Image (cartoon, helix red, strand yellow):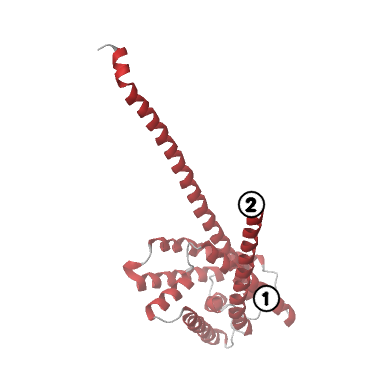
Amino acid sequence: SSPTIWLLFHAPVLYNLKLSSRLISQYILLFIRVEAGVIIKIAFRYFIFTIGILFMGLGIALTAKSNLGTTPMSSFTYVLSLQFPLTFGQFTFLMSLLYFIIEVLLVGKDFPREQYAQILIIPIFGYFVDLGMYLFSAVNPDAYLARVITLLLACLILAMGVYLQVVADVLINPGEALVKVIAEKTRVKFGNVKIMFDSTLAVIAIITSLYYFSSIIGVREGTVVSAILVGYFTKVYDKIYRGLIRKKKRSVRSGSN
């Protein structure tokens, strides 16, 4: 057959193929846009989480510099850093790594794959603690009022770090993750396990400081106050955030009307 006859015979098929190729191209572009949007959202959430870890490290460091005691979770590592050549952040790294290993052992094969990424934030967290100790190296309040103000500021910073991690909703830092696992395994409320966990670390810190320094270091009234205020400030941040979201939604609705 001649090319003309062949073209006339296959013209409908070629036209449909052309339409199909256009549809396929549109679907591919739509898929790329959707995937790009998802990747950007996930990357942004990890960015928020990292900022949260930064604030958490700075808050822990400033709490220690308040001279009113450290946070319960970091009390033991702080005492160790005063006795041994490793820094506060390096001991925080080692302790977080230990938390992660125990967490994996307790959960076993059911350990969520995405939570293995905790191993990546452990050294970052330790680095941010040391960064905070460096940035606040000149902070050494002597007057009790100055110490209280420093502690309050530290709690505000630390609470912001905790809240940003909650908002990001991607990972759990190893310490909190271990508490969560213990609560699930023992079927005890998370809050109760958290209190027992922090109290145990504080007692270990007291025993360690008495052994090495013959006095209590790192655990004082600020340890208890920080445990209470960080949770309170986190709730305040959540209330403010939710209020802003509701206000934004109302403005969008009024604008559309």
Q: Is residue 87 at least partly visible in the picture?
A: no
Callout 2: helix, strand or loop?
A: helix
- Residue at image x 47%, y 64%? 171
- Which residue has dot 1 on it? 152
| Residue 21 as seen in the image, left or right of residue 91 | left
Q: In this view, does 155 lie above or below 248?
A: below
Farthest top residue in view = 2
Helix, strand or loop at disc 1? Answer: helix
Residue lying furthest left: 1
Mark number displayed over residue 73: none
Q: Is residue 130 visible?
A: yes
Which residue is denoted by mark 2 in the rendering? 256
Depth check, front residue: 36 or 162: 36
Specify which label sits upstream in the sequence, 1 or 2: 1
Q: For the residue carrying disc 1, how many other residues have a C-alpha within 10 Å: few (<14), some (14-19), or many (20+)?
A: many
Q: In this view, does 208 lie to the left or right of 106?
A: right
Q: Quadrant of residue 142?
A: bottom right
Question: Who's the residue at 34% across and 21% down the image?
Answer: 11
Instruction: Residue 51 in the image: state x and y as whole percent.
Output: 58, 61
Type of residue at label 1? Answer: Leu
